[in-house]
Amino acid sequence: MMYKIEDIINKINLLPEINNEMSFQFAKISSKLLRSDYEKQSGRRIIINILNNWNKIESSSQELWSDIIEAAGFYPYLHKEESKIVLKSTAGNIRKEFHKSEKLDIYMHEEQYILNKILKEGKNLIVSAPTSFGKSLLIEEIVASFKYKNIIIIQPTLALLDETRKKLMKYKEQYKIIVRTSQAPSIERGNLFLLTGERVMEYKDLPNIEFLVVDEFYKLSSRRDDERSDVLNSATNLLLNKHGSKFYMLGPNIERISDGFAKKYNAEFYRTDYSLVDNQSIDIYSQHLNMFGAVGKKKIYKENTLFTLLLELSNEQTIIYCSSPKRARYLSKKFVDFLKSNEKVIRNDNLNIINWIKKNVSDKWVLIDCLNYSIGFHDGALQKHITTTIINYFNNDRINYLFCTSTIIEGVNTSAKNIIFFDETKGLRTKIDFFDYSNIKGRSGRMMVHYVGKIYNFNTPPKSEEIIIDIPFYEQNPLSDEVLIQLNHDDVINKETDQYRYIYDTLTDDERVLFKRNGDLVKGQKTILDILNKDIHSNYELINWTAYPSYRQLTYVLNLAWNSLLKPGESVRPMSLNKLVKVTHDYAHTQNISALVNSNFIYLRQSDNSSSDEDLFDEAIRDAFQILKHWFQYKVPKWLNVVNQIQLYLCEKKNLKPGNFSFYASQIENDFIRENLSILYEYGIPKSAIDKIGKLIPENLSEDEVITLIGTKRYYNTVGLLEYEKEKILEIL
């Protein structure tokens, strides 16, 4: 028998009350669906919507539903709602207790329990499950078991790693938590490494890693156009094949992985649609056919439709997906103007970050106005402490709206009731595909917070497609030079290719070792080596520097990197080589974000006569944070270190005294913060606060001792700290 599930769910939500007869009908349908291998999730969806409308159900039929909820394995909800959902069945209560975690004060749902059992048995596990499945809970189960001494958790963003660090700080007595490559592992305790793929490869002398977690493992794929795929493959290959690590890989919406991978590594690929949240789609575009557009009146109409909807949703948390940071800020500002015209909207002036922004960035930044009207925006360019604070405000109902970029796809954990799919691209041209759309949709609702999440589609959703994730270091088709050079010679499948011959015949053994250690574009590194080899005597003064380079020296080194280490097709807009040299050189002397903003504004004003000062100033702030995050804290130090290692190698061969760029690279990467204080920056404390309390902290203390000292001496009460700065320091103690 076929059921129109959407009709049943609509009925549950629209009925003013659910009498016993109706309740029994819904229960009967749900029970039948739960017994079907193909329609179980439809049965679960009915249960979730019943839970969301529990107050409509007559008390005499609630016991029936309690038994069905238990039959579906929804033990977390039975525990959470035990005051109103009473499970009277003895057998049901026994099964519930059977699903209680041995280590944590939580109950697992049916399939979490199955997966945890697989991991406890020592088998490797690759999980594809919805966002609301609760996959990350199993990470904590692994840690809390204390079964493994050295664990690495790889996540794609520093924001996710920071969230994981906060969750796992409770295990700091058993594990040293390592988030920076400068932190040495503990000998007495276990070690919990929370790192990106890049940092795994940069970490010198890793101890033997017994267990590996790869979160959002779809980023291994070379076919999803992620520039960091190579380094994640290299890191995973290192840990699986050199360290022999057991592993847990997790991600959403994946149908299959490379054939044979699971068998080779004694892993189980477990795909499920099990979810404790119902994601419901509402198609706004179909209600306004041919009325939406990207320019002119249709653009304005689409924006006003969005703003009207957001006002209707003002009592719920809502995320709006935007194609770029520029779009997120533009729409935020337009929405503020819309709200200002509505007399019923109340301003929200009591957020401590606002005062910090005024004193340390600019009182003209549009974010201040946005926060005053319960709006935040979130993208990969903002400083960590700002993004963390905005997410905290959002999750704690202190702001209601969040304009997001693709960072939402990569796993920003929020308690959003609603998602609005407003833009249909990533960046200017790349269309959101079915995989990305599914991830965006999955962010609506959250297990243990919202039973039901809604996605409002302002565009036609992409067509369904099978998502297959390739694992290049295993499959080797295709395979980049950068992953190939990291493989053991015996693990290379095809040794008859031009690519293989280039790596193993054209390059010398020394070059191969050097390029492998540097971990950047192989042919680009070879180009730099050849140029330096040819010009080293005539340009020796341009590489023979330590500490801070002159303008000419910095120009020479960044020119080598820019022309050789950018990937084909890699976007650098709006950066140019000349601008990069200037801003890097200038920032090293000012070390001040406000100065970077002001110089950016002057640069933009000179080349743009039509935009208002207000719009240009906001663009200058956006670009300044992008420069700080992408160029200063990622690209420039990486490039400096690569060129540094190549010139060290050459100078040694030619008996020349080498330069040393590592100090300058480290200073740029850590925003010119003293080395033993950099851990504070990593933990999301603003540089302004670190500068104030840094004077009280001895230079000879280790990074771990610094945090202990701040707590014992109560340096968070230091005179001169803003309330916001004090809040951020207290968060890490």
Image (cartoon, rainbow, N blue to C red):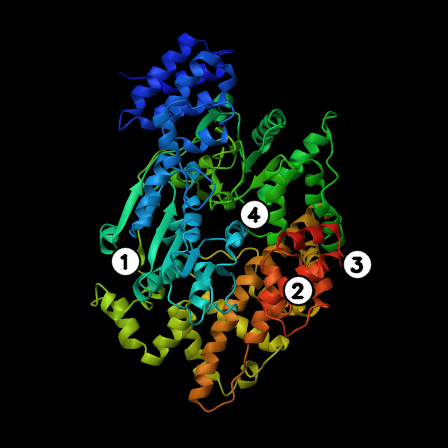
Query: Given this view, does label 1 or label 3 mark the residue nearer the observer?
Result: 3
Label 1 – label 3 distance at C-alpha: 56 Å
Residue 240: name its quadrant: bottom left
Q: Residue at x 42, y 24 (%)?
A: 87
Q: Earlier in the sequence, mark 4 or mark 1?
A: 4
Q: Give, as a three-letter code, the residue at label 3.
A: Val
Q: Give, as a three-letter code, the residue at label 2.
A: Leu
**Which residue was labeled with disc 2?**
709
Q: Earlier in the sequence, mark 4 or mark 2?
A: 4
Q: In the image, is 81 to the left or to the right of 102?
A: right
Query: Given this view, does label 4 or label 3 mark the residue nearer the observer?
Result: 3
Q: Earlier in the sequence, mark 1 or mark 3?
A: 1
Q: Regarding mark 3 in the picture, which secondary structure is present there?
A: loop
- Please state the horizontal and vertical placement of residue 369, each as a whole percent of the image: 71, 40
Q: Earlier in the sequence, mark 2 or mark 1?
A: 1
Which mark, residue 474? Answer: 1
Label 4 – label 2 distance at C-alpha: 33 Å
**Which residue was labeled with disc 4?**
379
Query: Given this view, does label 4 or label 1 mark the residue nearer the observer?
Result: 1
**Which residue was labeled with disc 3?**
719
Which mark, residue 102? Answer: none
* Residue 578 visible at all: no
Q: Give, as a three-letter code, the residue at label 1.
A: Tyr
Q: Residue at x 26, y 69 (%)?
A: 500
Q: In the image, is 115 to the left or to the right of 731?
A: left
Q: Nearer the viewer, residue 97 or 525?
A: 97
Q: Earlier in the sequence, mark 4 or mark 3?
A: 4
- Please state the horizontal and vertical placement of residue 340, each as a whole percent of the image: 73, 31
Residue 404: name its quadrant: top right
